[in-house]
Image (cartoon, rainbow, N blue to C red):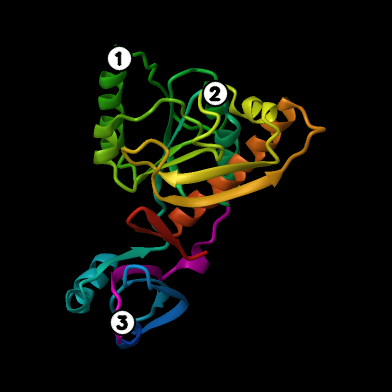
Amino acid sequence: MADHKGEIDGLFVLTLSCPDRRGIVANVAQFLTSNACNIVESAQFGDPADGNFFMRVCFRAEGKIRDAEAFDQAFQGIAAEYGMTATFTRVGDRPRVLIMVSRFGHCLNDLLFRWRIGALAMDIPAVISNHRDFEELVGSYDLPFVHLPVTKETKAEQEEKLLDLIDEKQIDIVVLARYMQVLSPEVCRRLPGRVINIHHSFLPSFKGARPYHQAHGRGVKLIGATAHYVTEDLDEGPIIEQDVERVDHAMSGDDFVSIGRDVECAVLARALKWHLERRVLVSGSRTVVFR
């Protein structure tokens, strides 16, 4: 994996959201300046639809404060004044990502490769699957593989094991890389904003098995994929990223599947990268993504 330690030394990211009003940007900039911080990147958005304000600032700390918790503490006065939800994160702190997969391995394979070459700044404490199809692939990356087979009778028990492993491994984010089991409402409630899923964008059309072949049979002209946060509402969580590819009548159902897999890999990788870089802020049923 690539080593960019020199580039990220002293770098932090501040993300915040609050009701929009005058002076937010000025006060944030003044806070950082007074604490000997140099702003490297800044983006903000005031949403006219609901009156909320969102901001992401990447900065280099060059003064006495060099710790995320210390920044949090020092910023509390401003956060309270503006009613902010604010988080400071050190860029060098790599999120711990748990990947889950079933029997379609294209997204898993893509994420593992991007991780190995340093394109995704994360640690992978384990890969979980309800099948053993990709145990050898995961082992080739020297990563732990956890087999949790799921049946109707064992689903609740296996989900408890999943939650225990998330706690034990101190997992920050779970990625469903074509994991074909629906997470229970209890799991969704216990992991808000911490589970990312990928699926084709035909929904609510072409549900069930072989969706790309169903789409081929209906003469679909666009194939797409959606990455979103998981909520109790199946496949309806806040969308992080989407993309499409054009298809035509000369292509087969298998061609549709191949193109769809490529789109799914790219969309999931972008969504995860933006999440890892703290570029995604949830706003109700939507997201603000500072790309």
Which of 280 and 72 lies nearest the eye of the viewer? 280
CA distance for labels 1 and 2 = 21 Å
At numbered mark 3, what does the secondary structure look like: helix, strand or loop?
helix
Contact check, label 2 and label 3, Cβ < 8 Å: no
| Residue at 59% across, 27% down | 211
Q: Which residue is mark 1?
A: 154
At numbered mark 1, what does the secondary structure look like: helix, strand or loop?
loop
Taking the image as shown, residue 147 lies to the left or right of residue 215, namely left
Pointer 1 local density, CA inside 10 Å: few below 14, some 14–19, many at least 20: few
| Residue at 48% across, 32% down | 143
Q: Which residue is mark 2?
A: 134
The image quarter containing residue 182 is top left
N-term mark: 3 or 1: 3
Q: Give the residue type at disc 1.
A: Thr
Q: Give the x, y percent position of residue 204.
A: 49, 35
Q: Give the residue type at disc 2.
A: Phe
CA distance for labels 3 and 1 = 50 Å
The image quarter containing residue 286 is bottom left
Taking 73 as reference, is 202 above or below it? Answer: above
